[in-house]
Amino acid sequence: MPEEVLFKSESTQSRTEIATYLRAVADSLEAGDPITLKQGGESVTMEPSARPTFEVKAEREGPADALGELSIEFELEWDEGGNGGDTTGGLEIE
C-alpha cells in the first residue's frame, strides 16, 4: 500500500522542548482528544483509535564499522475507522 505523508516536521530541539511536545501528545491520548500537528501554514488533525498499535524502535544508521546516527522512533498506527490493533504488551520505558 503506498504511503502518503500528511505532515512532516524535522528540526533540532532541546531535550526539554521535545519533552514538552511528547507531554502534549500524551495528554491528548490520555484525554481521548484528537492530536493536531501545526507548523507554519500546514496542519493536520488526527484522532487515534482507542487502542492503536504502538511501535517503539531504537536504531543505529550508518556503516557497521563506523560511528553512525542513533535514533528512537515512536509510532502510533491504527486503521481509519478502526478500533485498535493487537495487544502484545510487555513494553517498559524507563
Image (tube, rainbow, N blue to C red):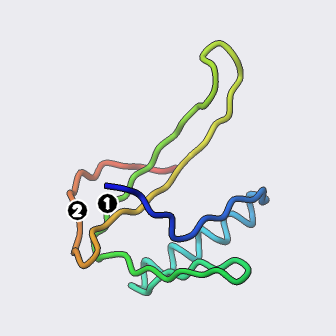
Element at label 2? loop
Q: 68 and 2: which one is in front?
A: 2
The residue under the point 53% across, 74% down is: 25
* Residue that appears at 47% across and 44% down: 57
SS at badge 1: strand
**Number of dots carrying numbers:** 2
Disc 2 to disc 1, C-alpha distance: 5 Å
Which percent across, then down, holds residue 2? 37, 56
Q: What's the amino acid at mark 2?
A: Gly
Asked if disc 2 and disc 1 are in contact, CB closer than 8 Å, the reply is yes
Q: Position of residue 83 (x, y in %)?
A: 22, 75
What residue is disc 2 on? 85
Name which of mark 2 and mark 1 comes first in the sequence: 1
Where is mark 1, residue-wise? 53
User: Which residue does the image show at 22% across and 74% down from the upper left?
Assistant: 82
**Which residue is nearer to you in this view: 28 or 76?**
76
